[in-house]
Amino acid sequence: MSKEFWIIEIHKKKNIKDVFGQDTKKSIEEIGISEIDEVKVSNLYKIEAKTDKKNIERIAKELFIDNVSDNFSIYKKTRTKKGFWIVEIFLKEGVTDPVGETARKTIIESKILNDVVVKTGKKYYIKGKINQKQIKEICEKILANTLIHNYFILKKRT
Amino acid sequence: MKPKVLILRVAGTNCDFETEWAFALAGAFAEKVHINQIIRREKKVSDYQILVIPGGFSYGDDIAAGKVLANQIKLKLWEEIEKFISQKKVIVGICNGFQVLAKSGILPFNSKQLITLEWNDSGRFEDRWVYLKVEENVSPFFKGLPEIIRMPVAHAEGKFLPQNNKVLNEIERNKQIVLRYCDKEGNLTGYPYNPNGSIRNIAGICSKDGLIIGMMPHPERAILKYHYPDFLKNEEKEEFTPSFKIFKNMVKYFS
Amino acid sequence: MNYVREIDILNADEKELIEISEKNLLSLDIEEMKKIKEYFLSIGRNPTDCELECIAQTWSEHCYHKTFKANIQYIEKNGKKIEKFNICLLREIMEVTEKLNYPWCISVFKDNAGIIKINEKYGAAFKVETHNHPSALEPYGGAGTGIGGVIRDILGVGLGAKPILNTDIFCFGPLDFPYEKLPEGVLHPKRIFRGVVSGVRDYGNRMGIPTANGAIIFDDRYVYNCLVYCGCVGIIPVNKIEKKVNDGDLIVVIGGRTGRDGIHGATFSSASLKENIPTSVVQIGNPIVEKKFQDVLLVARDLNLYNSITDCGAGGFSSAIGEMGKDIGAVVYLEKVPLKYEGLLPWEIFLSESQERMVLAVPEKKVEKLINFFASEDVEATVIGKFVKTGKLTVYYKNKLVCDIDIHFLHKGIPKKNLRGFFERKREKPVNFKSKNIKEDILKVLSSPIISSKEEVIRQYDHEVGGRTILKPFVGYESRGVSDGVVLKPFYETYEGLIISCGINPFYGEIDPYYMAGCCIEECIRNIVSCGGNPEKIAILDNFCWGNISDERELGNLIRCVKGCKDYALKYRIPFISGKDSLNNYFKRKDGKIISIPGTLLISGIGIIEDVRKICSTDFKKEGNIIFVLGKTFNELGSSQFYRVNRIKGGIVPKPRPEKTLSLMKKIHIGIKNQLIKSCHDCSDGGLITTICEMMIGGNLGCKIDFSNVLTEEKEIEIVLFSESCGRFVVEIEKEKLNEFEKLFKNEELSQIGEVIEEKELIGFWANKKLFKIPLELIYRSWTSLNF
């Protein structure tokens, strides 16, 4: 088996307040982009290992999520979402990722995998009447610092 | 007998010194023990009467507050903890410790995870003094306390949240709620009196037998009257606070 | 693979030497490059990349403080009078401490932090650092690693002190700065602000150290260069202050691994910010790594497992090992250094500024025990070399010699700089600006960004972890009031206390940096005294952040400020125990225009008291109590907050009066100790009226004041309310203690101005005539109106 990437996305259950989504929405409005209906934020864990999806699921379920407040999904390629712009942000190569390191250690300690690299990221779902230029502005002024982050924009599916 | 208190340390624990001091002052023999010492079998949990998981940021609170330590307890210390509980010994989780007890399922029923401590409604870490209503509860450690007491909270993830109403009602019915956030008069009101948006203002709970305690506020930071933010105005007579009495009660329980 | 590059300087002419410096981001000037060439000519070979980098780091402004050590020709013009003399800035500051020669200043200007004695067994260490450039580029990471760095300074002072308090002081651009005016590559002040606050919060809170004192200043000139000061206080047993590397001690690195991060940090932070910056200079910290070794380190200290320690900060191993081995010599084997990832060149390993690392000198027979001890709590400790009496810094990588330079040359070879500074005193003239609406102006001052409440920020810091915080940042009713400082009870077993506060006001420097220095020193002492501190048991730290000091006028301003520091510290009889400077905080715009920060001096102070139970807070305590102003008010509205909110330039800057104020402060100390004074708050930014409003907010009580009773040079309402004259305090006294109070303050300047009332309003009179009435609710709302 060769090394593969999976992404575990952890998001709040529907009835749980997404405090970071609300904060981000406020920040976007402060830079003068007011046509925002909703922002949702998920945590991403990019898992690099020789394994299968079942183990990745175990990692998410047994080690990462909070049974009361979180849901998760696993994917390899980000899919678009109807009505939402999607932005994914990861730290650049070589930038310290303390959470990724802790996640790696807890996976190894659990013995689910014995060789793994974890990188953490954030995923933003942004709903509203905005264009490509504005979404780029949001990324550079609020969500990412291009000195240390890479960001990817996925166009809104209509 | 002087009870032995094990104050569990891991990477990121940071309220261990003041917790040790509070227990020592209350008459216990308190000892800070690193989790590795237990895993390496240099120390045994069973040699102690009280196990404390103190405040801090265990493993940086990475992934979620207390989550990694909860995983570790389930993976590595489970047998010892189960035995400790079955012997009717005492477990206390303060702040980060409460998060660990909730996420490992030890509270409220020692089963799978049924409650959590979510991000504060403000989305931020906040340090502030709160009023707490001492509820009628099954725990022996809150006896003889005034109806309303004060201590600080200092956390980012402290919003008490049950999985569903069934869990919540059961905890209430069992008198497992020990502390609720309130205002000066004891009314259960909103922010900032309820600093994090906790459901039904719940600040601390206990197990069915009252011997396992989990609370977000920090009694160990409110031991002396000089800890009160307004001690210069309200000239309290007692040198020690009601919060200190909680530690006293635990020590007394074993003597 | 060829790991080592030889750099040809032996054949380089002056132009080429400068090119080499620029191309390699060395920030060395021509005199320095020539000196390096001279050295290598004398040993008959070219330097390696590692050697050149190592010298550049050691000689950088950040590490060596060349400007403060330089020989400066200073010209001061005052009208027609011209003074001319030579000055060394570091000498000026150190002279204060030498002259005062207090026995309780037990380690000053030689270690990572200054240390004063608390009692026979323990000392308190204090250090304040800046992390400006990294915070401007990556606010979260920059501020976090700033606090992480200063904590390591405390862990590395003597044989290691236990950190018990963090302080932070920030200067930012206005939060409502227009986006369209921001040059490309400059982050908006709001973003910097939020990132910096989160960075300090997440790092400090995770370290389990309370953050409980600070200040935030806003001004347009900080848009391009924000200032982030991070301080840390620690306690250390007095028998752990001496450290000494012995011949044969092993070099052990503990904590985090080494990566490419932070390379060129020291040289970078000594230069100005331009519009293009390399990525490698910014980094994210990992507080838990630091927390882990902090826990073990202090136990290892008490087991005497090592002889010396220092932190790995700017300049990385090059700086840490070079400094520790400067009287001996060292051999380092870089292939032994644990790396985050492969592919680093030897010079990168040696110069990397990866966070959370410290270097220890460990006797060979204890090294196994030490390594096992650290490993028991999952902290990596690795032997990477040895201190040996060779007089050289020798570095190998996989048996290849990559650096072999004379330690003496490295530390003493730097050519002394000769600089020139010029200062011209402005003629200060009163402006006599009249308020159109006093009530409105009061509320305007209260809601100005500098005066208004920073509660939203401060609450995000854990300010009482450790259970040592007695006087907290918030006091009084619902903890709404503000403190002048923080009082800590460092030991659980005793009631001894430390009081920490600061003084900063860059605006006074626009008129005269000399008086700015005096005002900052006095403000810091005043704050400590009004919490109950003893003015004879306070030590201070200086932190100068300045703009483009290659400009003779800006350097002149700095010299004038240092002179003020010296003169006033001597007059208040307060010693400096540590200090730091961060120069070249300026931004070069695309059009070539240089924008400097205003010269900013931060004075941080630490006071020692016998009993934390006998302190004082700023909140009014009880209706019926009498309110006094201690000290005299002058027409000193220059650069005041009142003038700033009304956009008035000029005026007269406050002039401290040390003799008067020192005598007053000694009596305040007695008054608080005897619990005669119920509340006490000093007057500073925003004037007397701000002080009174803050005391009302904290007390949730009103007051009735006749402002015409305030002892003043000129009986004008604007002066009485808003002047920022030094040496003034507002105190609250119980009626039955009036005689005792007046007896204590006999011969002092004092005026009885009113009383505390139950009605929640401020009622202002002038010669018995009612001037205004402002509800407390409105005062509170204005004061908390700043939107972060």
Image (cartoon, coloured by chain):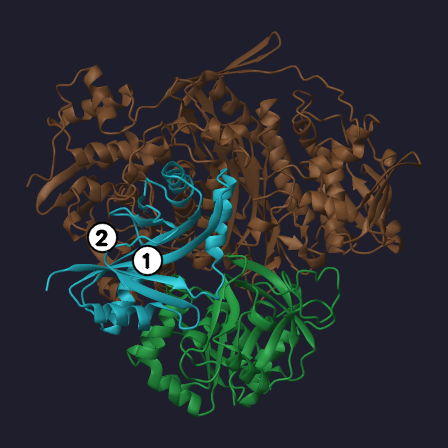
Of residues C306 and C376, which is closer to you in this image?
Answer: C376
Pointer 2 indicates a residue of which chain? C
Viewer-nearest of labels 1 and 2?
Answer: 1
| Residues under numbered marks 1 and 2 in contact, where contact means CB atoms less than 8 Å apart | no
Q: Which mark is residue A44?
A: 1
Going by the numbered disc 1, the residue's amino acid type is Leu
Q: Is residue C127 visible?
A: no
The secondary structure type at the circle numbered 1 is: strand
Chain A, chosen colour in render: cyan
Residue that extends furthest to the top in the rendered view of this protein:
C80
Chain C, chosen colour in render: brown
Pointer 1 indicates a residue of which chain? A
The answer to which quarter of the image holds residue C362 is: bottom left
Badge 1 and badge 2 in a common chain: no
Provide the residue designation for mark 2. C340
Going by the numbered disc 2, the residue's amino acid type is Lys
Q: Position of residue C422 (x, y in %)?
A: 50, 15
Q: Which chain is green?
A: B
